[in-house]
Amino acid sequence: MSSINNDLIKYDVIVGSKRLSNFLWSGILFIGGLGFIFSGLSSYLGINLLPFSNPKELVFLPQGIVMSFYGSVALMLSFYILLTIILDIGSGYNEFNKSEKIVRIVRKGFPGKNRNIFLVYPFNNIKSIKIIIKDGLNPQRLILLCTKDQREIPLNQIEQPLALTEIEEKASELASFLEVKLEGL
């Protein structure tokens, strides 16, 4: 999350699906899916389609069919991740404008009627900035914009947990910029 700051405007750019981990997962699923499909086809046709193993000796029912099913699921997931990368789902920006006294939150979604998500809140509707920190198997480190009507809008990238000092620094800087209280510390 990069940002552009001056005295009146704070602008944070949010990276969407175009990140290295998504490219890696898409590639791994694609290669693995092809391997499983070729194993299933090898067992059906009785021809070895993979040079590094001998899957033609697999019994087509049930092993070959299961391998083909797993391969097709992996290929579909790979194409889905690739589609989210191409469409750059989740990318956008947060703009905090003191001169207009407005917060703009913009994100890209899936194609359709609501492709672009555009939220605008006046400063007087903002209650606080909240930090959520959960450690464990699936860690979460979020900065949320809390409004007076009980909405909590995430402001940082969900997938990449920030360091504790970095998230606390960004949240406190934002709370002081907006002149609201900071919750969750």
Image: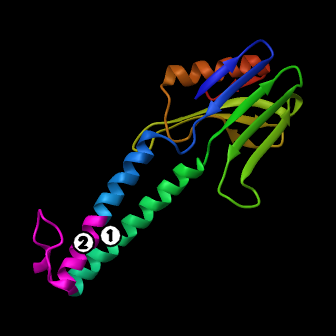
Q: Residue at x 21, y 80 (%)?
A: 63
Vertical arrangement, residue 80 with respect to residue 13, above or below: below
Query: Looking at the picture, does residue 102 appear above or below residue 56?
Result: above
Instruction: Specify the quadrant that holds the N terminus.
Output: top right
The residue range painted magenta reads: 34-60
Q: Position of residue 73 (x, y in %)?
A: 39, 69
Residue shown at the point (65%, 56%) measured from the top left = 110
Q: Residue furthest top?
A: 7
Residue 84 among those drawn in magenta: no
Which amino acid type is shown beneath numbered disc 2? Phe
State left or right for residue 32 relative to residue 9. Answer: left
Q: CA distance from mark 1 to mark 2?
A: 8 Å
Location of residue 91 in the rendering, given as x and y in whole percent from the top left corner: 62, 41
Q: What's the amino acid at mark 1?
A: Gly
* Residue labelled with disc 1: 71
- In the figure, residue 136 lies in which quadrant? top left
Instruction: Tell me residue 98's x, y (percent).
Output: 84, 20
Quadrant in the picture for residue 122: top right
Kind of element beneath mark 1: helix
